[in-house]
């Protein structure tokens, strides 16, 4: 008997981490000492921790999508404020109409903020908010668009929070990338399975039969899932290749 092969490169990231979690659990249960893979398991454990960190990074790193959603929300707020000012220009109350006219001049001077690049947009919004809360505060109060100003501040704060977390992440420990980590842990997994298969030839099956059976059952299950997902009826044949999916 021997440990079967499996196409780890075909796994999704979460699926791959779950498989290595299963492997880690089996080695821990049977002990690396009894399996005669102590040195290899030390390397495996470190890489297993790294993969967990890399997976967390992947889950948290969709900053572009988050910023896009915030940007859309910010554009809606800007458009809403623009419509409120436009409506004020037609107000029956001369004071409100005058306040709207003042704010229209400010708005025109700021240009079309929604079409600016992200960095330029952030700067333009910061300046706009300062003006709305400063020299134009009385006009804002008269027109009654305080809520729009508050909402714009909220949008800007949300944008800055996502951007700051992106920078913090880049500086932090979770700089590990999934593709690189998966290639490394797949390599040590292959080393472990090859060593155990070789030890079976040297020492016989008895010390490894229970471990091998349990691992092979899991390999069969994962391979079946891969076949179902890929619409294929055959099992994988390669344990690791450099083209690991990120």
Image: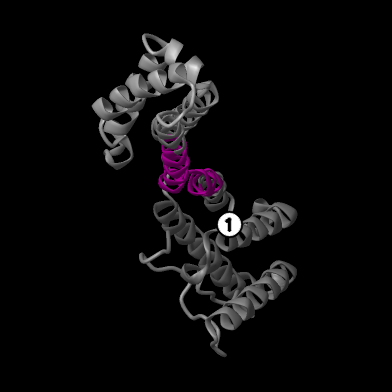
Residue 42 higher or lower than 143, as above or below: below
Question: Image quadrant for the C terminus?
Answer: bottom left
Task: Using the rendered view, name the quadrant where residue 106 is placed.
Answer: top left
Task: Using the rendered view, name the quadrant where residue 243 is placed.
Answer: bottom left
Predominant secondary structure in magenta?
helix
Relative image position of residue 208 (x, y in whole percent): 69, 68
Q: Is residue 246 magenta?
A: no
| Residue 239 or residue 117, whichever sits in front | 117
Residue 152 higher or lower than 54, as above or below: above
At 70% across and 59% down in the image, what residue appears?
A: 26
Question: Image quadrant for the N terminus?
Answer: bottom right
Asked whether, in this view, residue 6 is left or right of residue 33, the answer is: left
Which residues, given as a range, are shown in magenta? 51-79
Residue 53 higher or lower than 87, as above or below: below
| Residue 79 or residue 73, whichever sits in front | 79
Relative image position of residue 169 (x, y in whole percent): 44, 34
Asked whether, in this view, residue 186 is left or right of residue 210, the answer is: left
Question: Where is mark 1, residue-wise?
Answer: 17
At 36% across and 64% down in the image, what residue appears?
A: 242
Asked whether, in this view, residue 84 is left or right of residue 21, the answer is: left
């Amino acid at each position: 008997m021997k440990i079967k092969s499996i196409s780890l490169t075909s796994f999704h990231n979460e699926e791959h981490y779950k498989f290595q979690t299963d492997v880690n659990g089996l080695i821990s249960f049977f002990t690396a000492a009894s399996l005669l893979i102590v040195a290899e398991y030390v390397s495996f454990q470190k890489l297993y921790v790294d993969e967990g960190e890399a997976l967390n990074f992947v889950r948290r790193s969709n900053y572009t999508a988050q910023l896009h959603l915030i940007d859309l929300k910010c554009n809606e707020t800007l458009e809403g404020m623009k419509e409120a000012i436009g409506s004020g220009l037609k107000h029956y109350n001369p004071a409100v109409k005058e306040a709207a006219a003042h704010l229209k001049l400010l708005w025109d001077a700021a240009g079309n903020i929604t079409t600016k690049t992200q960095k330029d947009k952030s700067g333009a919004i910061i300046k706009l908010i300062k003006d709305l809360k400063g020299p134009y505060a009385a006009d804002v109060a008269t027109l009654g668009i305080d809520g729009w100003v508050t909402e714009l501040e909220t949008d800007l704060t949300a944008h800055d929070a996502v951007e700051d977390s992106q920078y913090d992440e880049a500086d932090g420990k979770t700089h590990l990338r999934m593709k690189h980590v998966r290639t490394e842990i797949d390599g040590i997994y292959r080393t472990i399975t090859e060593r155990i298969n070789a030890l079976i030839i040297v020492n016989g099956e008895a010390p490894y039969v229970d471990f091998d059976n349990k691992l092979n059952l899991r390999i069969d299950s994962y391979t079946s899932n891969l076949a179902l997902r890929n619409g294929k009826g055959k099992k994988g044949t390669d344990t690791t290749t450099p083209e690991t999916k990120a």
